Image (tube, rainbow, N blue to C red):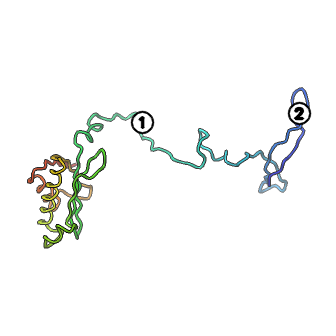
Amino acid sequence: MLKLVSEMLCVRGGQKMRPFLCAQISGFHTSMPGLAPRSFFGVEDFVDDDNSRPYTYQKGKKSKNPNKHVSFKQRTVAYMEPFTLDVFISKRFVSASITHRVTCKQVAVAGTNSKDIKAVLKSRSDIPACLSVGQILSDRAREADVYTASYTPRDRDKFEGKIRAVVQSLIDNGIDIKVYLD
């Protein structure tokens, strides 16, 4: 499709022959083909605004309000209360973990699905199972030198019943839990 077209281009003060690369284009409604300048590799049409990294389209999230003030508490809460409690309860089992917010590492984990707890319990999802998960989690957390944690229930969870039993068991066994209810 590409043609090397030589035309007589007049430059001020003299005549020179300059070859240039053109692509043959034809309009939908016209029967005559035309010539349009084309880039050598065909990449320049897809280059980002700053002429770097063609075919990469990573766009960072832009804040809806770039001038929004972020409070001191919002900036420092992850460092002031570094450990969070996560409780998951399904129809078949109960699991809970304490996670470090900054490094995202799980410090202590306990669940009724593990072999050592499975053998002892009658049911893996009732209130006594939740109490035993809280007790085992508090022992493992104390071994890792964690004595405080914060807990915010998920949107769909209510702070009652089995979740409250896990948190109350942790508090009774020496782990200070701050519960944030919205």
Q: How many angstroms separate mark 2 from mark 1 (CA)?
A: 53 Å
Q: Position of residue 20 (x, y in %)?
A: 82, 42
Residue 119, above or below 20: below
State the residue at coordinates (87%, 31%). Answer: 11
Residue 64, above or below 113: above
Q: Residues within 10 Å of mark 2 (few under 14, many from 20)?
A: few
Q: Secondary structure at mark 1?
A: loop
Does the residue at mark 2 contact the one at mark 1 (Cβ under 8 Å)? no
Q: Nearer the viewer, residue 111 or 69?
A: 111
Q: Position of residue 17 (x, y in %)?
A: 89, 37
Dot 2 or dot 1, earlier in sequence: 2
State the residue at coordinates (26%, 53%). Answer: 106
- Residue under label 1: 66
Which label number is shown at residue 10?
Answer: 2
Q: Nearer the viewer, residue 143 or 56?
A: 143
Report the residue that reaches farthest toward the bottom: 122
State the residue at coordinates (13%, 50%). Answer: 175
Residue 17, above or below 94: above
State the residue at coordinates (60%, 47%). Answer: 54
Q: Residues within 10 Å of mark 1 (few under 14, many from 20)?
A: few
Q: Position of residue 85 (x, y in %)?
A: 22, 52
Residue 64, above or below 131: above
Q: Secondary structure at mark 2?
A: strand
Q: Position of residue 22 (x, y in %)?
A: 80, 47
Q: Amino acid at mark 2?
A: Cys
Q: Amino acid at mark 1?
A: Pro
Which label number is shown at residue 58?
Answer: none
Quadrant housing the N terminus: bottom right
